[in-house]
Every structure is written in structure tokens, then in C-alpha cells.
Amino acid sequence: MQVRCLEFSKRAQEALLDERLQRNLQRIGVRFKLGRDMAFAALEDPEGLRDLGRAIKEKSLANLPFLLETLEAKVKEAGGVVHWARTAQEACSIVGDLARDRGVRTVVKGKSMVTEEIGLNQTLQAQGIEVWETDLGEFIIQLAGEPPSHIIGPAVHKSKDQIAELFAEKLGVARVEAPEELTRIARETLREKFVGADMGITGANAAVAETGSIVLLENEGNIRLSVTLPRIHVAVVGIEKVIPTLDDLAVILALLPRSATGQKLSSYTSIITGPRRPGEVDGPQEFHLILLDNGRSRILADPDRRQSLYCLRCGSCLNVCPVYRKVGGHSYGWVYSGPIGAVITPQLVPPRLARDLPFASTLCGACAEVCPVKIELPKLLLIMRQRLTEDPNFDGGIPLMVRLAARFHGWLLTHYSLYRLAMEGARAASKFLVHDGRWAWLPPALSGWARKRHVPAPTRSFSRTWPSLKRKLAQGGTGS
Amino acid sequence: MSISSRDKILSAVELALGFPPRDPSLLESRAPTQEVPWIPAEEPWEPLKKELEALSAVFHEVERLEEFPGVLGAILREHEVRRALFWEHPLLEALEVRGLLGAEAVEVLDPRKAEGFVGQVARADLGITAAECAIVESGALMVRASQGWPRAASLLPPVHVAILTARQRLRTVGDLVPLWRQWLSTEGQLPSGIHLITGPSRTADIELTLVLGAHGPKVLHVVALDPGAIPEST
């Protein structure tokens, strides 16, 4: 998928002006967060469970070579085929070749962030293969030609009248607005595709080394259809998704749906081990697992940033993020949005293409409080900011003017009498330059910074106003 | 190409981690016991019923074996079922499901015929399966794939009927682990497909409005057999 993170500020501005989007973002944030909080509150020991989740991911990554080899052996034992892809391009050509060799004409897809990451649909479509996103939200944005805007609800930015319009235009159906009717139309349209499809493509929420199984969570049943009806199932899975045992899986299953949607379990949890066995009449005849690196081993090599790979892709950090909830997923300009997107995008794409993202955060810490595997997101955001600004290859990050201004400010703060003099000067100037609470003029370095920020007029410090305040209070005044 | 990519990825990962030693104990179970902690059959259905109803599933308790035909017949008539797929499963055989379907003039699809299977099932109005167990905490039912137990039966028809006995209840998702390990040790591997089904298929992708019956069944009936309704042969 094309990286458009440099448009963050432009897109964020557009998003802020879009009233409908603002309403939708507000609703989803509140709903998902409430559901998540209630689900965790009902647990006996939510903190203990999150600690366990984190420990499992930590242990899994620390032993990744052994777990990957075990997973590979077990998948083969179950009759599956394992492929390894170092890059997005390599993964796409593996799937493309499989499809070509096996005469695949129609592909049905379950929702998967990783296939968005590698831009698989475009590769297959360029080969003349029909590709259908089958998750309702993904289907909607595929018809609209847009990327997903939320990990869990890819089409949350769209309202039902927009969807009604879209279906009428692209599917040639009568215009209906009721979500039930729109869902029925999608179900009927896609059911035909499922029955005729040759290949089902999914991601995986986890891969269990002990048994060679992949695990898929969903609510609609489209993923189950994708791995039940077509003769070939291809699962594209990041190498960080492997966990050791079924015990570990039970912990992930307790954490993930609660964090993502507030459900105790998703409507469907599928544990798939190889293709169909002799005598079985459905399920795929071939199962292919594609293990994808695409930058993950590089992240693994840095102990400070390794925890970025713990992410279960539940989306809960998006729902609580004050920045995400205003600017929406599209502003981030690539597949992953919100706090986790701001952390992993600059690690997965060339950093200078995503240099704005780690700065798109207030560092309020709400994300870290909800993360099911306790990823220290604010810390990672700071690390990414530091890496981006210290990187000698990082061109055009912070303008020279701002850097000089920051250095000057630092110097000023260490020289108290000069600092006070400067503040007095600013206060005097503000009498002429502040109109309606806004500065009419600021020196160049500050004016750029202040374009989207409110710069308050300086006031006297408390210690300087205290003598007169004390006098007023002594005389029985209120002090205001 | 893919062989060399394998080695390159594995060595990149090894290098990133400083060549960690292989630790086979990682793959051992942490559970203190490998007993499956079944809930005693006499315990009431209430907590499971509550979870299922909150998920918009329909719960039917069968106290005595003689009541089963009436319960199934009512479901068949409610949905005007003409064509059904059911599992060739010992429990369903003991309950004489095939005969009951015939008595209601329902056409029965063969769960072992691979030829044209999907096309056939796509036209079925109802699927009947036997659940391996239910998880009381969440209202989930577990089914598994096997010969004569097609996955489509709980997925393609608009109505899914799952039959469950009072002996097949677990409290949490963690309690499933020893059951999975039992399969691992008796069969050498997990079934090709294990599915936890938690209520009917649903979506909230359009303006967060909940709609049942997204791609899977719109209706889920759970027929729960009390100890007194479990056929003796099973």
C-alpha cells in the first residue's frame, strides 16, 4: 500500500472539518472504550491477565527462531505448506505464483491488516484475478476504493446513507438505508463469490507452534467461509504472531476479543490445523502459510523497540487516543493508525516518509492503560521521536529556526534575571500586539509554531502578584 | 527462492536476538493437571442460558428423552425447513434425528458426499451439529471438523441447531486446553478445524448498528439435554 503519511497534517485538518466524520469518530470511540472497560471490569484479575499476555509475547519473541522452526515443522506434519517472505513484494509474488499455477480466478479475503500492509490485492488484480474483501466493512471500503480507517471497524468513517449511495452505484441495487438491508445485500452478493471462489486468503491473530495451528477471530462468519469453501487457503502471517502453546492461546483468547470489541469471545474463533483430512468433505484441499518478515526482524534487533511487536492488533489504543479520535485513521496515511500506527509505521516504511506520526500524540498515556499486552506506547513514541530527530539521514525534520529558538529558550531559562526581563518585555508588548486573546504578531520561529496553537499572553507570576493579593484579602476582598 | 528467504529470515532473527538457545520446555503445558474440568451434569443450565440469550441465541432445555422430537419438530416448523444437513454423529443417531427429519418431510443432505457438496449445502435451510462442549462464562459452543461432520453445517444454512448434553460444560476458555491436549494425544494432532461459536453471526460495521446474520447463520438454537434426556447408548 502506498505510504501517504507525509500528508498527515493536511488530512488531519480535513478530518477536523468533516462534521459527519467527527460524529462517527466520537461514537465509535465511546462505544468501543465502554465495551472494553466493562469486559475488563468483570474479570477477576484484569491486571494479572494483561501481565500474563505481555509475558507470553515477550517469551515468544525472545525464542522466535525455535518457535518459527517448530511451527514450520508442525504445519508440514499437518499437511500444510510453509513459505517465507522477507519483503512485501516477495509475499505478493508467492501468492501470485500460487494463484497462477493453480488457475485461480476468484479470491475471497477475510479481513487482514497484514495483506493491506503488503498491498496484496493490487498484485492479484494486476494478474487479472477477481479479489473480494468479504468483511462487511472491508467490502464497503473496497467498493469505495478507500483504505481502512480503523483496525476493527474499517468503515466506521462512513454513514449509512453514504453506504446506501455506494451500493446503489456499484452493485446496481435499489437504494436502501437500513443497516439490516445493506447487510443482506452484501451477504447475498458475497455468498455467490464464496461459492465460486478458488482461493481464500486470511491473516491470523496467532499461530500456535506446539500444534502448527493458526487462529482466526471474527464476528461475521466471512473468515470461516473463506477457509471452508475455496479449495486453497492461504494465510499471510507476520513472524511476530507465533506463540508457543495452547495454554498461551487461551490467554490471548481471553484478552483479544475483550480489548477489541468488549466481547468475552468473538462470534467465531477458528483454530485451523492444516488442510482438510481424508474423508472430510469441506475445508480447503491445500493450506499455505506465508511467514512474513517485512521489517519485523529489524525491529526485533532493537531491545528498546522490540515491544512494538507485542501488538495483538485489537485497536483499543485507537479508541482512547485523543488524537485518533479527532483526526481518524485516514490521516495516518498508511495501514496502521492511532498510537500503535504512529509507533510501527516509521519502523516498517522508510522513516522519513512517516516522520510526522510519532509527533501526532499528546503523550497522555491513555493508550498504555488499555493495551492488553501493556506495550509502553508513550515511551515508544518518545524513542521514535528521538530516533527520527537524531538520525543523520533524516532530512528536513525540525526546521533550523525552531532548533535555534529552542536552544535560545533553554539558555534564557538558565539566566533568571534575563528571563524575567524578557517576560516583562513580552508582557509590555502583548498590550499592543494581543487582540481578542490572540497575538497579532510573533517573531518568525514562534509564529510558525503558533499557527495551530494558542499562545497565551504572559501574565505576572504568582510570587509577584502575591503582595497586592495579600493586601486585598486582608481588606476582606475575594482576591479576584 | 523461498528456501533462501527462509534461511535469511531465520538468521536475521537469530542475529537480532543474539542466538538464543533452543528451549524445548517452552512447548510444555503450564497446566497443573491435564484433567478436563467438566461441570457436574446436575448443575443447572441457568448461567449458560443467560449468556446464550444475551447473545440472541435460542435456548431449549430438554428434560426427558421423549420431549426431544417435539422440540426439534417445533424448530423445523418455525423455520419452514425443507432441506437440512446434519452430522453423522453418535448422539444425533441415538436421538434418531434422521427419522425425525423424515417425519417432517425434510430432505436430508448427505454429509459425506464431497461431489457438489457446497452447491447442495448452499440450498439447505438448516444445519444440525453436536457440540463438543459449551463454555459457560461466554456462551460459546465448540464444534470440530471430522468425517461426516462437515464445517458447513454450522455455517452455510441460515439456521444452526447445536445439540449439547449436560455433561459437556466447561467454565472458561482456559478449561478447553486439557480437552485440546486429549485430542492431541489420542489423534496425534488437532482436528483440521476447531470452531468456537458464540451466538449467531453478527456485524456492526454500518454505523455500529448490530445486525444478526452477517455471513453465517442468523439464528442459533441450542438444544440442551438434561441428564434424563441423554440417550443411554452415548
Image (spheres, rainbow, N blue to C red):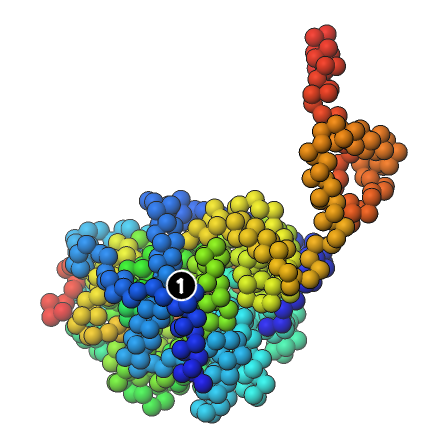
> Residue sitting at 66 percent across and 76 percent down?
A169
Image coordinates of residue A311 in percent, x first then y, are 46, 59
Report whether A90 appears left or right of B53. right
What residue is shown at x 43% (from left), y 46% (from top)?
A38
Res B33 seen here:
yes
In the rendered image, the residue lying farthest to the right is: A432
Q: Is residue B230 left or right of residue A240?
A: left
Q: Is residue B133 left or right of residue A121?
A: left
Using the rendered image of the protein, determine whether residue B106 is visible from the camera's viewpoint.
no
Tag 1 secondary structure: helix
Residue at (25, 70) in percent of width and height? B130
Q: Position of residue A316 (x, y in %)?
A: 49, 54
Q: Quadrant of the N terminus of chain A?
A: bottom right
Three-letter residue code for mark 1: Leu
The residue identified by callout 1 is B17
Q: Nearest the camera: B126 or B209?
A: B209
Toward which corner of the image does residue A157 lie, by quadrant?
A: bottom right
Instruction: Name the one closer to the observer, A155 or A450.
Output: A450
